[in-house]
Structure formats: C-alpha cells, structure tokens
Image (cartoon, helix red, strand yellow):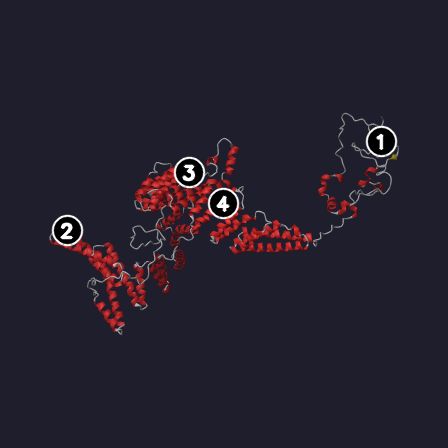
Amino acid sequence: MENVHLAMEEDDLYSGYNDYNPTFDSEELENDVGFQQAVRTSHGRRPPMTAKFPGTAIGARPLATSFGSRIPMVSSMGRPVTGAVQDGAARPMTAVRAAGYTSSLTRGSTFDPLGQSRGPAPALEAKNEDTPEEKIKILEKKVNDLIEESCMAQSRGALQLALEKAKEAGKKERALVRQREQSGNADNINLDLTYSVLLNLANQYVNNEMYPEALNTYQVIVKNKMFSNAGRLKVNMANIYVKQKNYPKAIKFYRMALDQISNAHKEMRIKIMQNIGVVFVRMGQYSDAITSFEHIMSESPNIKTGFNLILCYYAIGDRERMKKAFQKLISVPLGIDDEDKYIPSNDDTNSNMVIEAIKNDKLHQMERDLKVLTEKYIMTAAKLIAPAIETSFATGFDWCVDMVKSSQYVELANDLEINKAITYLRQKDFNQAVETLKTFEKKDSRVKSAAATNLSFLYYLEKDFDQADRYADLAMNADRYNPAALNNKGNTVFAKQDYEKAAEFYKEALRNDSSCTEALYNLGLTYKRLNRLEEALDCFLKLHAILRNSAQVMYQLLLEDPQQAIEWLMQVISVTPTDPQTLAKLGELHDSEGDKSQAFQHYYESFRYFPSNIDVIEWLGAYYIETQFCEKAIQYFERKALETYKDIHRKFPENVECLRFLVRLCTDMGLKEVQEYTTKLKKVEKMKEIREQRVKSGRDGSARSRREGSAGSAGESLCSGTFLLNNISRMKLRINSSHSSNSTKGERLSAKMRSLPGSNEPYEASSPKEIDASYVDPLGPQMERPKTGAKKRGEEDDFADEELGDDLLPE
C-alpha cells in the first residue's frame, strides 16, 4: 500500500483531464498549414513509421500525471503503470510505436508525428482530358451552358442572340452524338439533352417569327418515338397555325393533342378546348364554338369562357340563351378570399403584423386583378346584351341589374346603373340620363359622388353653371377626395372668372390624384388667364411628359419665338395631320418668316380640309394675284364671297338680297346648295309679298320700322360681299382682255361679265338655271375634320369647325 496514492476529500478527482499538448489540438487543425497540406496531398497516405530500434518507445522517460509532476504512477491495485519506471527498469511501450513515438526522442530529435520534415508531397497527377469519356462530359457541359445562355438572352429580350445560341447548342449536340457513336457508346445517348436542345431551338424560332423552321423542329420532336409525352407539343404547333391564320389546321392539331392527353390532366384538356372554341369563333363557326364553351362551363366554369359563350349567343341572336349564359357568368366562383380578411383587428398584435405583411403581396395583387377582370367582363356583357334581350335598351339593362343584385357581385349593380346613364348620353338622350343619375342622390356616398359628378358634367356642357356648381358641391360633400368632382367644381368657378379660386380646386384635385390630367391641363389654362406664364408652361410641360401625343397639350406650348412655335406645330401636325386650324397657324408663321412656299403649302392644306375659313381663302387669293395667277384667285375670292354671304344669311335669314347673291354664286360655281337657297328665296319672297300687302292695308305699320332697321344692318353686312363680287368681275374682265386672241371664248366671257353688276348696282339673281346633280367640287371631296380639341362654347355647327383652343376639360 506504500505505492498507493490516496485522494484527499478536498482534491478534484477529475482535474488535469483537459490538460494536453497543443500538438494534439484537433480544433485547430483547420488552421494548421502542415496538416492541411498533408490532407490535400498524398503525404497523409504514407505508411506509418516503425521504430528503428527495439526496446521501449520512450525509454525511462517519466510520464506526466494530472498533478503536474513527472513521477511514476502505480495502479490502485499495486500493478505498475505501463511505461513507468519501477526498480530502475524501463518497460518498452510498443503500443505507441506506430504513432511515431520512438526512442530517438531521448537523443534530442524533434517531435514530428506527421513527417513534415520530409518536405511537401509531390503534386497530384493531372486528369487526362484526352480520354473519350472526358471529352464527352466536357461537350455535354458546353451544350447545357449554351441552352442556359439562350434562355437568359430571351428573358432579356435579345431574341436574335437567343436564336444564335440555340443553333450553336444544336451543332454541339450533334457533334456529341457523333463522338458517342465513334467511341462505341451509342446506346448511352442523353435523350433528355437532345430533347432540351430541340425544344429550345423551336421556341426561339417562334419568338423570332420563323414559323416554318419552328414547325419543322417540332415535327422532329413529335415523330421521335423515344421522346415521352412529345405529343403535347402539337399544341405549340397549333398555336403557330393560329398565328398564320391557318385555322382548319390549327383545329386539327389541337384535337390531335387533345387525344394524346389523358383525362387525368383535366386542366390542360380544358385549356385546349378553350383554344378550339376561340378558333371556331375566328372562323365564324359559332355553333361549333358554343359546343366547346358549353362543355367547359359544365366541367370547369371560368369567367373568360362564360364571356365568350355570351358573345357567341349574341352573334347568333339567341335571346333566351344569352340570359342563361349571363346568369352562369355571374355565378362562376372566383375562389378568392374576402377582403374582410385583410382588415386588421385591434386585439391581436401578431395577427395584425401578419395581415399587414400579406395585404400587398403578390398573391393578394393577383386576386385583385382577377376580381377587376371579372367585373370588367360582367359590365361589358351587360352593356352588350341589354339592347338585345328585351324590346328596349332600358328594359334589358334593368333585367341585368336585377340579376347582378341577386348574385355575389351585388356591388356592381350601382355601376351598371351609372353605365346605363352614360349609354343614354351616347344616344343623346340627355333627359333620361339626368333622370337616371338623379336616382342616386339617396344612395351611399361613393355612388352618390359618381352620379353627382356626371350630373355636374352634363349641366356644364349645357352651360347651366348654377346646376353644375350645385352637383359639383354635392359630389364633393359625398366624397371630398374625388378628383373628378373637384375638377368640375373648378370649372364652374372658372366660368365665373374667379381664376384664383379655380386654381385652388385644380390643385386639390391633383393632391388627391396626381394622375388627373384634366385638372393639370385646366390649371395651366388658369395660369394663362392669370398671366402667370412660367407656371402655365410648367404645367403643360409636365402634361406633355405624361401625354406625349396630345395635340391639345402641344398646341398650348407655343412660344413667342417663331422657330420654336413652328417646331411645336410640326409635332402637332404629326399627331393630327388633318387639323385645319393648326395648318393655318403654321402657314401664318411661315408667312411671317418670309417663307411663302411653305406658307402656301400649309394654307392650301388647311383650305382643302376646311374650305370655309375666310382668312385662309383671302390669303390664298392674294397669293395667286401676287404670283399672276388671276384665274385661280377668282376661285378663292368666289369662295370667300360665298362664305361671307353664308355668314350674313345666318344672321339675317330673311334677307332677300343675300339669298339672291347665294343663289347666283352657287349657280356660277356649280354647287348643289343652289337648290336649298332657291327654295329659301321663294319662301322669303312670298313672305315679303304678304308683308307688303299687310303694310299697304295699314295693319302692320310697326313691322315696317323693325324691317327697315334689320334691313339697314343687313345692308351694312352686304357691302363687303358686294365689294368682293365687284373685284371678281374686274379680275374676270382683266383675264378676258389678256386672252383676246381667243375670240369665241372672249365674247362668251364678256357677255357673262356684262351681266355682272357694277360697283353701285345690286347683284341680282341670274336667270333660272338647271342644276346638275352630278356636279363635283373642283377642289375635290372634302375630308371630315377629326375632333382634335374641345369645341368652343357658342360655336356654330354649320361646318363642324372644332379648333384647338383654351377650353376646359370637364370630367
């Protein structure tokens, strides 16, 4: 028991077990350079070292104990510890020889269990890439990389590059197949890679609209029996035939694809049948299309198919089936969550955080888009079938409204009612529109605001500004954030010339909706009236950035610099090339710059589209006189005289002399209007005779004074027309004298000129002349002027002259 060491109670029995040599620290092996080099090379795979000398591993070296002293340890039973010194003899430690412990340590050698002193191991042998297997693997990788590059180029919109990469992948893949055959591995061909190459190539052909090449590539895939499910690609081939408008062949391939798809893939079969129905509609075979759409609505109803079914029934005029299809349409389940789900509660904080996170996520956005699309289809279908399902439009629309009220889309009923009022407006039935909109005054705020906004718009167009102002206030009270209501309110204030206040309403409309272009345009006009030109220009420049092709906006950007004004007007002409007012303005600017040829071109184009502008006619006549073309000048001055007398006739419709001038001018110019003015002249002359008889009998004395007063006013207006006719007569005489060599023509023209009145003689009507109904205006047919701008208030409608100007834009 002498050699037994008893542990004291205060000693820690487990102390010293964590004391070890840092060389054996496995946690630091990742940072040990020598160890990592041994792992990466063949150094660590060398056979273990053996002892060079027989005997003990460490000789008589004492072993460190947990107490830190190098003393020999004895077991608790008195057995000496292996390797410990007992009686001066050292027991050999052969068990640790393989780890590198040798007796040489006692002779001063360093401890090197990993053999690092021998230097780095030789480098690993490089992989031989000349073998057929390695070449095949490298080529396969290149083909996959090219396919990926082609797809990425397509996603960026580089379609030509995508096609080039796809073709290169095809070449590499064919080279790969040949290499496999040469190496004797033809049975190991990668069919998936071949399929991917061909499919990508066909898709890139389609994207580049190279349809014959795409069809050939798809045929290679479809005819190869080794490709599973390749028959589905016949859908792609059918889509190409639809783009080529080869509808019979498209139907054939859709049906072939349908036969090769099992009933387990129900959704795909439904989509193919929907394509078949759409192609039948394009072919005009509505009965076959109805068969496809009805099958879909019975198996898996959806909104688009229901809408297409209504269109087919409308095309064949089946009222009852239109009603049934509309009822099916509004009963299609959308499968989306209720909006109440996204309303946060006040109790659960975690739930509110989740709701806030999913409120505007992509899934909710997709649901909103689906709901908006569904409402659009329902509204369009109702407006389409309403006039067809009943005897009157109103009755049909009421039926649609009743059906919607009893469906899941009950909130659309009010929108349908408003659309009913708008339809009345398009039919120019303003009274019915107003009555329909007035029924919304007691509805909820949103609908009331929309209806009141439309009523304000109607009364504004009728120039009933008091009623327009009243309903604009009603719309604002129902919804203060309604930009259309604020815009209309600003218009009514603008009409009262309170421009500062109008500008405030337009600004508020823009604060509520920055995309309200009407309010921005009207604000610019208001600044112009207030002579705040810089702010007006800023408004119109902002609007031009939003509406790049708006002729009205570009017209407002005209500056004092003629060159800049010409540039803006040329942009306006590029958008509305037939606007006569813009062409006339452009001609005026070129004339002020001294460019007569360009001025003539634009003035002539303006006259061609609108031959009633007296200023344009006068300029053209003066131009021809200046260039010594009096014959052409006569045509324009006759036209000017005609328009002058027409204007006088509008002001004094019972003036006999004016009608006589019109009859004579229309007769000389060969216009068809002579019949109309002849009839009016006869009526007025008859009324004049009756009045004269009454005057003679003394029963209408007061009427004489009124007639004389109106005749005096008309006489002043007739002076200008008579002056023009006299000038025309003199020009004709001048032309006649210059052509005196032609005696026959000169005599005929002289006789005609002698029939014309002198400067102080009345221009009486010529002898009755038969009008040729087949007469064609020598200036050619007149083109209808497009409506490029808002119509000026109080403008006459005789010539449909709608000019670009400073009119407000109502909502």
> Type of residue at label 3?
Tyr
Label 1: which secondary element? loop
Q: Which residue is mark 3?
A: 409
Q: Residues within 10 Å of mark 4 (few under 14, many from 20)?
A: some
Mark number for residue 702? 2
* Residue shown at the point (25%, 65%) measured from the top left: 728
Residue 361 visible: no
Question: Which one is in front in this view, the residue at disc 3 or the one at disc 2?
Answer: 3
Tell me residue 780's x, y (percent): 33, 61
Q: Quadrant of the N terminus?
A: top right
Three-letter amino acid code of the residue under disc 1? Pro
Say if 379 sits above or below 642 in the image.
above
Residue 771 lies, in percent from the top left, at: 25, 61
Circle nearer the viewer, 1 or 3: 3
Q: Which residue is mark 4?
A: 271
Q: With 710 as the anchor, is 406 left or right in this view?
A: right
Q: Earlier in the sequence, mark 1 or mark 3?
A: 1
What kind of element bears circle 4? helix
Closest to the observer: 232 or 641? 232
- Residue type, label 2: Ser
- Name the residue furthest left: 697
